């Protein structure tokens, strides 16, 4: 090749390496959260997470609350928020640029009127153990509010400077104060006293301290204006400067966020700078795809270990803890065929664009030369062995070994004893390596310079010679994933096969792995995930929470999880909890589609997943809590009016339209949150929903418990939940006392009714018997032989004299009897009818007695329709006739008169010589009948010479 | 005129300096040094055009005893530019010089300086930078060189147009940088 042509190529290559240097540094994926700007020129200033999990955002318009779904603005006339803090009792406090202090009470912003507050910006608020409020101001030093008592610390009290940038509560007794002239250490016993100044004289690299923070080891991190960061070891009383920070080029530090692995540093002009684990190296985080931050104001790690950033007046969120992205320079982007990590941590990968490597976290990706002999288009597998030699498997071209010592390639094919030239997978432990091919499996002893191959084909007991994956378990058994033979195992006694698992077809298995608990896991085409615990097979599919039955890769990590890939993202499966968690577009994993062997596990436990344009670095973690959304009851409403969220609420019977507003806090992918709720007391069933508001209209009275669970993968076992108890009161007419009262009343009523009816029935019966008695009496009287005898005598007397009269008499007699027959069964008849009947009777009697019987009738017309029992008057008349002697000298005068609603029947008394046996039955019967029928009493007045019966009408 | 201008500056922009200088302190006092001929250069390095301008009418004052300083200049005093039209645009459209005739920076030196001992002192000056009527607190790095009786202050810093609400139409982004590089130099002679 002519020199002129080599030079540009070299320059290009060199340029490529240089340009990649910054691009290849890894970074989490930052997702921009659009902050609805209702107002113009919103300036985001502060971010804070409260104990409920809400994210609070401070701006020049005050605060707003974010639950992943929406921002809730809290109206206030406040100035720009410059400090956010939460007191020990869970109240949110705000400090403002104009010095005012506010707090939240029942979701309303209230001014804190403690007397004095700064007239300059509040820069920081912290609460000590006694819940005293310590406030740093920009110009007036420190204010301490102790329930109305205000004390101040300024330069007069020894504070280095009155311009306070930051405050940090170091422990229960001291607070650190960052100023332009170093750090003032203040004892917070009593009113607070400056006890120490830490500045350049005591080893602080830069006096202008902009920010302070504390890490989990108790070190105090100090961010400075010009010299980057350092940390202070309290026990050693010494400032420690990470070597990589020397010569800090990133200018002013605004915030420091020490995390588990790395320390994130927010700079004023250079974005986020990452100080790596063990503080060895420093690099500017360059999320090539995400944001290229410049001025970073705020960094916050939330309770899910996600990082929130306010940079360039935008809000972003990164799931930085679990995944980091290593961007591949654009000119080298192509689907990665195989990736491996050697014992030194050096990452190797191959794509159609060639062989590449990356030494460690901060080194750039470089293209490797020395592999020209290998046609990278044919490479399918790669393995770094215990000597850091690379083994490269190809389609059809056999196996290559790349020596880490002399950088030379060696080529092995079937000619050298390999069973097949299609090397689908390579794995190994120590000196024993295994190769899976399309013609069987090969064991390879790499102890010597030249590998020794031992081949296994179907003749040796292999169930299938198409081997896709081989895994060596903790007992040194080899597990094979084959096409056609399912899975089979090789131990000292030979090969063992397993029947195909129900639900998987054709015994095709793509990948097999072992978790730290000794379970074997495998998967085939659309099979879901299958577990073999040594005894039985268990299948996990979308029903159990798997994102997709189509799994591309499967590998176990060192913390008890499985890492799976799908076409649209990665999934972590916690073996013990049997819980899935999927990471998709929100984590930057859209369309990653890793190839078959694009997974590798580093000796330190990280897993690398090679995609077309990036490599995903996964850090295993045993904690599962980060997979669970936070769950809070935001509001309870009656007829859509908020009633607060205090448990055990009691509502009236007409306050029975109840809504629950809850939120599953899952900021990374709020749309993924699903809920399951139940209203015990109303229905036993659990209802699945994605709504975060549920309303129960028309709840009947009763005791209820509202329960909600939240999940991000449709798996509600161990899901966070809350309960809310409430009671809907019965209306008063349904209360026990009211019902008892009413029941008692009704019982009483029924009792009286029954008693009354019994009495009425008794009366009726009595009346009936009285009636019968009277009828009998009347009959008896009418059939009285005297009456008949007398009547017939009378008839005989007149029959010759006056034929006409006799006929009339007979007619009268018969009329009388007919009338008697007609009226007898009746209860009551009109007085007119009775008088008519009586007229017949008197006619008959007068024929006999002539003038000796006088009847004086004086009945008012108004009483003619009054009702009386039949034959009463007749019986009285008969009685009068019966008991008196009747002669012309002593005529019997019967008067029948009415007066004042009474009927008076009277007769004069002419005693008989003889006595007529008086039974008294007739009169008594009349009295009873009238009493029963009218309820009125019949009066009898019996004087010497007159007998009167007074019947009420 | 210069005296009048100086007083005008003191009153309009050097309010903080005024605060430092109590009325009883006379200018002859040796702690207070004044230089009316400081130099300032700015450069806008945009992809399509580089614009430079210069002024040597920066008025500066330092108070050695209080470590405080104040600088100011009339925007009108800038010379240079690539054309007269550009100069006109600079004053009329961007800087609105008639409305905001003065730019100033006043505050304190944070890092310690021994003005009586020869040497080169890297120093950060924290103060209020007022340009285009907009105040911004800045910490600006510079050097103070003390050589015999001459104190020289040098500083280079960047002014972001956005910070000072200087609106440049999007159409000229290729010609006017958003970040302007400013260099300042001033000599103070101890009497």
Image (cartoon, coloured by chain):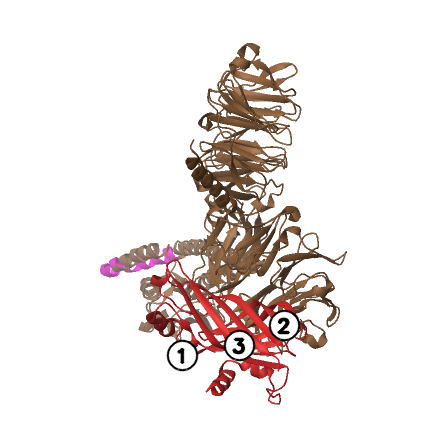
Q: In front here: A633 or A842?
A: A633
Q: Which residues are magenta?
A: A787-807
Residue A105 numbered tag = none
Q: Residue at x 44, y 41 (%)?
A: A330
Disc 3 designates what residue? B71
Mark in the foreground, 1 or 2: 2
Disc 2 designates what residue? B146
- Check the image and name the residue furthest to the bottom: B24
Mark in the foreground, 2 or 3: 2
Is B149 within the magenta?
no
Disc 1 designates what residue? B99
Earlier sequence position, callout 1 versus callout 2: 1
Colour of chain A, in one word, is brown
Q: Quadrant of residue A361?
A: top right
Q: Where A696 falls versus A496 (above or below)?
A: below
**Label 2 element class:** strand
Left or right of residue B121, residue A441 in this image: left
Residues behind callouts 1 and 2 on a single chain: yes
Is the residue under label 3 in contact with that under label 2 (CB below 8 Å)? no
**Residue A436, position as x, y percentages in the image:** 54, 20
**Label 3 element class:** strand
Q: Quadrant of residue A782?
A: bottom left
**Label 1 element class:** loop
Q: Residue at x 33, y 71 (%)?
A: B85
């Amino acid at each position: 090749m002519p020199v002129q042509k080599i030079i540009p190529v070299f320059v290009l290559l060199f340029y490529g390496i240089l340009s990649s240097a910054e691009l290849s540094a890894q970074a989490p994926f930052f997702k921009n959260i659009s902050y609805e700007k209702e107002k113009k020129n919103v300036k985001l200033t502060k971010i804070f997470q409260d104990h409920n999990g809400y994210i609070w955002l401070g701006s020049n318009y005050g605060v707003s609350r974010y639950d992943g779904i929406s921002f809730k603005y809290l109206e206030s006339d406040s100035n720009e928020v410059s400090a956010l803090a939460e007191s020990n009792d869970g109240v949110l406090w705000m400090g403002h640029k104009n010095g005012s202090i506010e707090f939240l009470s029942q979701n309303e912003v209230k001014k804190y009127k403690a007397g004095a507050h700064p007239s300059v910006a509040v820069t920081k608020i912290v609460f000590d153990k006694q819940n005293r409020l310590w406030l740093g101001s920009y110009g007036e030093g420190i204010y301490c509010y102790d329930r109305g008592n205000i004390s101040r610390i300024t330069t007069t009290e020894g504070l280095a400077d009155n311009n306070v940038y930051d405050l940090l509560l170091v422990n229960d007794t001291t607070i650190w104060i960052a100023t332009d002239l170093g750090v003032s250490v203040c004892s917070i016993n009593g009113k607070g006293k400056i006890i120490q100044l830490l500045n350049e004289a005591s080893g602080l690299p830069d006096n202008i301290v902009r920010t302070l923070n504390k890490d989990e080891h108790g070190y105090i991190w100090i961010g400075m204006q010009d010299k980057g960061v350092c940390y202070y070891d309290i026990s050693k009383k010494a400032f420690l400067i990470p070597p990589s920070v020397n010569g800090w080029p990133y200018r002013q530090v605004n915030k420091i966020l020490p995390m588990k692995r790395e320390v994130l540093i927010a700079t004023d002009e250079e974005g986020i700078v990452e100080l790596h684990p063990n503080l060895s190296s420093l690099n500017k985080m360059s999320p090539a795809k995400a944001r290229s931050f410049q001025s970073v104001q705020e960094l916050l790690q939330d309770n899910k270990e996600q990082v929130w950033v306010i940079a360039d007046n935008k809000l972003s969120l990164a799931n930085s803890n679990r995944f980091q992205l290593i961007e591949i320079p654009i000119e080298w982007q192509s689907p990665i065929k195989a990736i491996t990590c050697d014992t030194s941590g050096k990452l190797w990968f191959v794509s159609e664009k060639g062989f590449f490597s990356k030494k460690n976290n901060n080194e750039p990706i470089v293209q490797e030369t020395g592999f020209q002999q290998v046609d990278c288009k044919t490479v399918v597998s790669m393995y770094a062995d215990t000597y850091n030699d690379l083994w490269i498997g190809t389609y059809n071209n056999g196996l290559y070994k790349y020596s880490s010592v002399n950088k030379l390639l060696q080529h092995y094919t079937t000619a050298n004893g390999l069973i097949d030239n299609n090397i689908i997978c390579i794995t190994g432990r120590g000196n024993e390596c295994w190769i899976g091919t399309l013609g069987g499996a090969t064991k390879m002893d790499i102890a010597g310079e030249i590998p020794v191959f031992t081949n296994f084909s179907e003749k040796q007991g292999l169930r299938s010679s198409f081997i896709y994956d081989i895994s060596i378990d903790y007992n040194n058994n080899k597990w094979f994933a084959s096409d056609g033979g399912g899975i089979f195992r090789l131990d000292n006694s030979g090969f063992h096969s397993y029947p195909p698992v129900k639900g998987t077809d054709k015994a095709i298995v793509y990948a097999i792995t072992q978790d730290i608990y000794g379970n074997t896991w495998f998967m085939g085409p659309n099979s879901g995930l299958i577990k073999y615990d040594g005894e039985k097979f268990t299948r996990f599919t979308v029903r159990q929470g798997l994102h997709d039955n189509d799994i591309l890769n499967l590998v176990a990590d060192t913390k008890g999880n499985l890492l799976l890939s799908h076409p649209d993202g990665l999934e972590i499966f916690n073996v013990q909890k049997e819980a899935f968690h999927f990471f998709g577009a929100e984590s930057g994993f859209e369309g990653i589609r890793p190839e078959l062997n694009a997974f590798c596990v580093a000796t330190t436990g990280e897993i690398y997943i090679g995609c077309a344009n990036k490599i995903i670095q996964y850090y295993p973690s045993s904690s599962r809590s980060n997979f669970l959304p936070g769950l809070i009851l935001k509001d309870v409403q009656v007829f859509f009016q908020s009633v607060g969220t205090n448990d055990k609420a009691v509502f009236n019977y007409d306050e029975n339209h109840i809504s629950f507003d809850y939120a599953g806090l899952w900021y990374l992918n709020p749309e993924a949150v699903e809920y399951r709720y139940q209203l015990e007391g109303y229905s036993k069933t659990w209802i699945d929903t994605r709504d975060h508001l549920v309303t129960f209209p028309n709840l009947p009275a009763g005791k209820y418990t509202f329960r909600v669970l939240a999940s991000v993968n449709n798996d509600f076992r161990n899901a966070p939940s809350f309960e809310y108890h409430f009671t809907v009161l019965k209306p008063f007419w349904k209360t026990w006392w009211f019902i008892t009262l009413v029941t008692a009343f009704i019982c009483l009523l029924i009792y009286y009714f029954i008693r009354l009816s019994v009495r009425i029935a008794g009366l009726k019966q009595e009346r009936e018997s009285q009636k019968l008695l009277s009828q009998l009496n009347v009959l008896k009287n009418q059939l009285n032989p005297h009456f008949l005898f007398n009547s017939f005598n009378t008839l005989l007397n007149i029959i010759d004299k006056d034929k006409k009269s006799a006929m009339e008499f007979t007619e009268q007699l018969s009329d009388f009897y007919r009338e008697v027959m007609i009226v007898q069964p009746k209860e009551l008849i009109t007085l007119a009818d009775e008088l008519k009947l009586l007229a017949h009777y008197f006619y008959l009697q007068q024929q006999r007695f002539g003038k000796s019987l006088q009847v004086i009738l004086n009945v008012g017309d108004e009483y003619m329709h009054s009702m009386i029992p039949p034959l009463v008057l007749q019986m009285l008349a008969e009685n009068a006739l019966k008991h008196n002697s009747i002669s012309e000298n002593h005529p019997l005068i019967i008067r029948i008169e009415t007066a004042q609603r009474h009927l008076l029947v009277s007769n004069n008394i002419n005693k008989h010589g003889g006595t007529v046996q008086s039974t008294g039955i007739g009169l008594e019967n009349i009295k009873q009948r009238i009493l029963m029928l009218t309820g009125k009493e019949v009066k009898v007045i019996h004087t010497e010479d007159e007998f009167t019966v007074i019947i009420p009408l | 005129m210069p005296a009048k201008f100086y007083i005008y500056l003191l009153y309009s922009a050097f309010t903080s300096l005024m605060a430092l200088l109590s009325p009883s302190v006379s200018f002859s006092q040796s702690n207070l040094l004044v230089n009316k001929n400081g130099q300032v250069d700015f450069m806008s390095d945009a992809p399509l055009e580089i614009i430079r301008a210069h002024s040597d009418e920066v008025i500066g004052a330092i108070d050695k005893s209080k470590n405080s300083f104040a600088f100011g200049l009339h925007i009108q005093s800038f010379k240079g530019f690539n054309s007269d039209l550009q100069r006109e645009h600079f004053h009329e459209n961007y800087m609105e010089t008639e409305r905001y005739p003065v730019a100033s920076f006043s505050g304190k030196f944070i890092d310690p300086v021994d003005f009586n001992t020869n040497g080169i002192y890297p120093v950060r000056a924290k103060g209020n930078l007022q340009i285009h009527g907009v105040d911004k607190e800045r910490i600006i790095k510079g050097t103070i060189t003390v050589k015999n009786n001459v104190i020289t202050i040098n500083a280079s810093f960047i002014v972001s147009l956005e910070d000072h609400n200087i609106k440049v139409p999007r159409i000229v982004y290729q010609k006017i940088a958003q970040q302007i590089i400013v260099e300042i130099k001033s000599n103070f002679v101890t009497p």
